[in-house]
Amino acid sequence: MTDVPWPADWQSGSPAAGRVRLRAARLPDLPHIPPWSIAAAAALAAAVYGRFMASGHIKYAVGLVLVALYAPVVLFAFPVAFGLYTSVLFFQDIKALSFAPNAMGVLVALGFLGTFTIRGEARAIVQQHRRLILIAVLLLLWLLITAAWAPATAQALRYSGFWWLGGLAFLIVLGTCRRESHVALLSMAFVGGATVAAVIGLSGVGLKPPDPTGHFVTQAALQTRLTGGAGDPNLQAAGFVAAMFLDVGLLSVYRRPWTRLGLLAAFVLITVAFLETQSRGGLIALGVACLAALILFPAQRRRLLGFAAIALVIAAVAAAGTPGALSRITDFGGGTSGRSDIWAVATQVFGQHPIVGVGLNNFPVVEPRFSLLHRNVTRATYIAEDPYPVHNTYLQLLAETGVVGLIGFLVFVVACLRAGWLAARRFERLGHKALANLAQATVMGTIGMLAAIFFISDGFDWRLWILLGLGPALLALSSGAASASAADSSPPPTRRVLLPAGDPVP
């Protein structure tokens, strides 16, 4: 018995020498259809249908055209389709888009569920991320269960559906980002959407919300604040914070000069638009994310300080052009839409229902009753006459779903952040500097958005759940890279072969 190297072309169960190999049946060549012709046909068909089905309304025709162009992308290039939808999330409230964003979301969900079940990837994805998926499912089930004791059951069920859609976005990220290129594509789409929203807002479109009775800020407070098609400047600022960090991380991934120049230009536009939102909560979130980056990733301090200096220069130039924005941002004692009063009432609601809460999205239902217990109310309109949400995702979860709901959400969030942090460390050990920087940027951007929702009620935002999904996706990629590196460094396998006595060993 002698150990000999396994031949490079050895295949288990291959035909013996001299045996005739079966040739694969040759399929007939399919006619080549240029992609531009598919897009042109979809646009033409949608325009014709839009003219007759939409009674000539341009915005409905535009919506049909966008959906018709988008459907083939979902079928044949799903990662690209998901990236496009991620970009649209930044400006989905623009009236010109009509129903297109909602229709795109439906197509994304159906397309993913189809491939998820048909290709048999469901078991592999669930097995790979079973702990995180279990935590997410338990959290979402608890939010749904709270409808059982909620005064307004329909509202609880409706908002539970929004949270479940956020969970679907998380699952789509896990199932779609199976390669490094997919993660880079999704991150670039996130930055691209923020850039388009910044251009829309800076050009003067989207300075006013589409709904003058919106429950987040008053109409008067939005007259000079940038929304960029998001409907609320505070929501847009939260996304801008995350996009700024992802932009910096992508500079290590893309090395072409023109691409890097475009990313730098996008960083400038997003930073200026972020300041024009005049969001104090967004500014605090940016500071929290930078502080967390200095603690979690000390090796990036010099790089982070460099970009912080660039951002300060941009802020100084922007402030010189719009001094009113700077005065509002720095005036932390100014108008806050009654946030301090609402927080006090939410604390009282939690005090009486500490374990299970009053039911998801039922704080505005019980808010007027609890306002009577709070004597020092300065803005009773936002509590008794036109009840507002809590303006704090964590406090709202505490009041509506109790300690159980808040702890479940925090456990899930911390697990996702830890996954991204571990991915960054593993990529660094493997020498994949670009992916390590992108993983670090993902963690910092996620922390920034999590800090921003401390001042708004927006826990089911798809952008947040997409960021939360990027951490585990990167960790799975780093595990695969580590396995590939170990396989490359191991000696070639050997096969024990029985040789006749006296024959030389080859």
Image: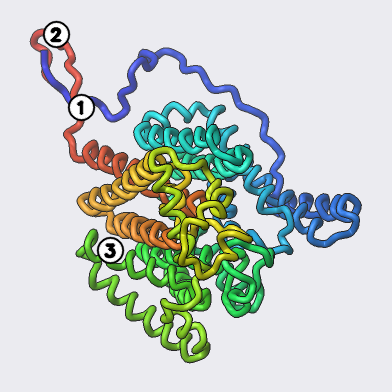
> Residue type at mark 3?
Ala
Residue sitting at the far bottom: 320
Q: Earlier in the sequence, mark 1 or mark 2?
A: 1
Left or right: 106 in relation to 493? right
Kindly check if marks 1 and 2 are in contact, taking CB atoms under 8 A apart as contact: no
Q: Earlier in the sequence, mark 2 or mark 3?
A: 3
Position above or below: 53 against 339: above
As measured in the structure, the alpha-carbon distance from the residue carrying label 2 to the one carrying label 3 is 66 Å
Q: Horizontal and vertical percent for residue 69?
A: 71, 51
Element type at marker 1? loop
Residue beneath disc 3: 293
Position above or below: 125 against 315: above
Q: Is residue 253 visible?
A: no
Q: Horizontal and vertical percent for residue 295?
A: 22, 62
Element type at marker 2? loop
Q: Bin the neighbour count of mark 2 within 10 Å (Cα to Cα): few under 14, some 14-19, many 20 and up.
A: few
Residue beneath disc 2: 500
Left or right: 443 in relation to 22? left
Q: Residue at x 31, y 67 (%)?
A: 290
Residue 231 is tagged as none
Residue 493 is tagged as 1
Element type at marker 3? helix
> Residue type at mark 1?
Pro
Q: Horizontal and vertical percent for residue 213?
A: 67, 64
As measured in the structure, the alpha-carbon distance from the residue carrying label 1 to the one carrying label 2 is 22 Å
